[in-house]
Image (cartoon, helix red, strand yellow):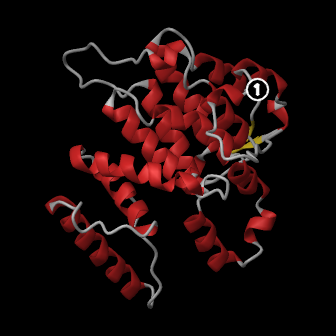
Amino acid sequence: MPHSRSHSQTEQPRPAEFPPFQALLDSTNWASLATACGTGESLPAALTLLTSPDPLIRESALQDALGPVTHQNSIYEATVPVALYVAAILNHPAITAGDYSHNAKTPPNRSTLVRLLDWLGDTAYDADDASVALDERLYGEGFLDEYEEMRAFRDARPAIFSAVHAFLSHDNADVRHTALVAAIPLIEHPLLTRHQADLASHARRLLATSTDRYHRDRVLDALKAWGHDTSGLENASDIAAREHYALLRAARASREGGYSEEPPF
């Protein structure tokens, strides 16, 4: 069953603290856990294929392994064990080797490592403080008390971060930028907020080199939330995007009688 990890000291979380991924796979009663389309009975087979040496098999397994536990931005019973398993295999040789399409007629695929980091980040944003606050406005302050699956994911953030953290300085820019974006919502956990300064340094480096709109939006939002002045870090594209989002919020507020939430990225 999903469980949380705690770090009573201020030492750096280490991926080595994870149980072996096979132990996570074998010790979980997948058939008893709810997914978007029933139970997790088929998840072990799909999760196992994520470490196949064949990149085409890994690509095919991604949807089968991750889709059933993140449908419509929801957190399910099976989401946490899947997230812990994904975090545990990030440093698997088949994952870290990278995989790209060699078909000259198609652009390169994103590596399995990037896809898995991206999924961990997306799922963490589905359970971040802003999502909780929004749901509490919609469903009442006791929302999180009753949403055990989301609570379990939020409790697991230190364990997941311990695996993601290792990729913040990866040689490949796409890997380290995706790891950074995944780490941002994870460090909202009280045990991890001390990592803000380190992530802010990585964020500044990303903004100096990356043109990825999603990555830039996420790190700029994080820096602002952490109290940093971002005016000297924004480029013309950032300013145009910010103005565009403001127009979307104003239009939505007008349609909904004054209520507005952040536009989806």
Q: Picture coordinates of residue 106 (x, y %)?
A: 23, 23
Residue that label 1 marks: 24
Residue 35 seen by the camera: yes
Residue 46 located left or right of residue 251: right
Q: Which residue lies at the image location 45% right of the left edge and 85% below the top edge?
A: 256
Name the residue furthest bottom. Answer: 257
Q: Which of 157 and 166 is in front in this view?
A: 166
Q: Where is residue 183 in the image (x, y as percent from the top left)?
A: 51, 46
Which residue is pictured at 61% across the width and 52% down the height? 192
Placement of the C terminus among the 4 image quadrants: bottom left
Q: Is residue 241 above or below residue 126?
A: below
Q: Which amino acid does label 1 sit on?
A: Leu
Q: Quadrant of residue 168?
A: top left
- Work out whether 44 lies above or below 79: above
Q: In this view, does 126 lie to the left or right of 237?
A: right
The residue lying furthest to the left in this view is 236
- In the displayed structure, does residue 81 sit left or right of residue 59? right
Q: Which residue is drawn at 59% across and 29% down?
A: 64
- Residue at horizontal 59%, vertical 65%? 129
Coordinates of residue 138 in the picture (x, y in percent) = 63, 77
Residue 102 vs 81, above or below: the answer is: above
Please indicate, yes or no, whether residue 37 appears anywhere in the rendered image: no
